[in-house]
Amino acid sequence: MTEGLLYVLSEPGAVAEEEFHDWYDTEHAPARVGVPGIRSGYRYRALDGARPSWLAWYELELGALVSPEYEVVRRRSPREVSVVSRLETLDRRVYELTDSWGAFDGPAPVVVSVALTGDTDALDEWYREEHVPLLLRMPGWHRIRRYRRVEGSGPDVLAFHEIAGAELFDDPVYRHATRTPWRDRVMATVTTRERRVFGYHNTAGRR
């Protein structure tokens, strides 16, 4: 069993927000969380003012995405065809879990995703030896998971943080964790960086 993450960024664009949410919450998400091996799914709204404004993420076994049941739900209904054709953004990525620290039963109030392309070995060592231990010292920094991209666009690796709130960014421990000499050396190898902050909206498949 290979643990994975289905990570989908979206922007309604020409789709009215009420229509966008009704499609997502009554058709799109329920179909996916009904597939064996897709254990949970959550929807989050951007807190950082950046676009795309919406994130849906699903915890799953990667094998679920090549199952006959998943192939069925990927056949778009006429309604889904209409909505998807009018979306400004639908960015679908699939990741394989490589590391996990901490524990939390979601949904976390806030998630931080940091996607990077750089020196993978240097990133791995820094995360394991310095960055993760520093962050997990903070009460409210619940869990950190790291992934490698196996499908879709975007940077090669993803760090996915589940936290109690955005106020943790003002904590001196956080400021230290993101300003060390080791961090600066590793970041000098990074060619692509994508950092996003999202707040909980709802549990996928539930109104």
Image (cartoon, rainbow, N blue to C red):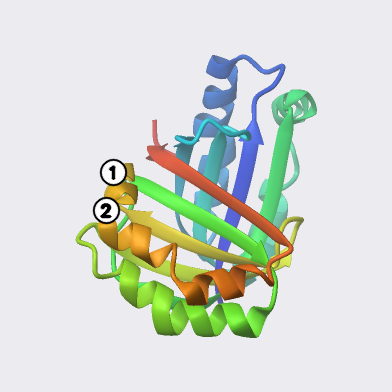
User: The residue tagged with tag 1: helix, strand or loop?
Assistant: helix
Q: Which residue lies under the disc numbered 1?
A: 167
**Coordinates of residue 136 in the picture (x, y in percent):** 29, 69
Q: Which mark is residue 171?
A: 2
**Coordinates of residue 185 in the picture (x, y in percent):** 59, 75
Amino acid identity at mark 2: Asp
Residue at the image position 38 percent from the left and 66 percent from the top: 177
User: The residue tagged with tag 2: helix, strand or loop?
Assistant: loop
**Coordinates of residue 47 in the picture (x, y in percent):** 45, 35
Residue at the image position 51 percent from the left and 30 percent from the top: 26
Q: Residues within 10 Å of mark 2 (few under 14, many from 20)?
A: few
Residue 156 or residue 180, whichever sits in front: 180
Amino acid identity at mark 1: Glu
Q: Is residue 22 left or right of residue 65?
A: left
Q: Visible in this render: residue 203?
A: no
Q: Is residue 82 left or right of residue 10?
A: right
Residue at the image position 19 percent from the left and 61 percent from the top: 139
Give residue 81's quadrant in the image.
top right
Is the C-beta separation of discs 1 and 2 under 8 Å? yes
**Coordinates of residue 189 in the picture (x, y in percent):** 69, 72
Residue 200 or residue 120, whichever sits in front: 120
Residue at the image position 44 percent from the left and 70 percent from the top: 180
Quadrant housing the N terminus: bottom right
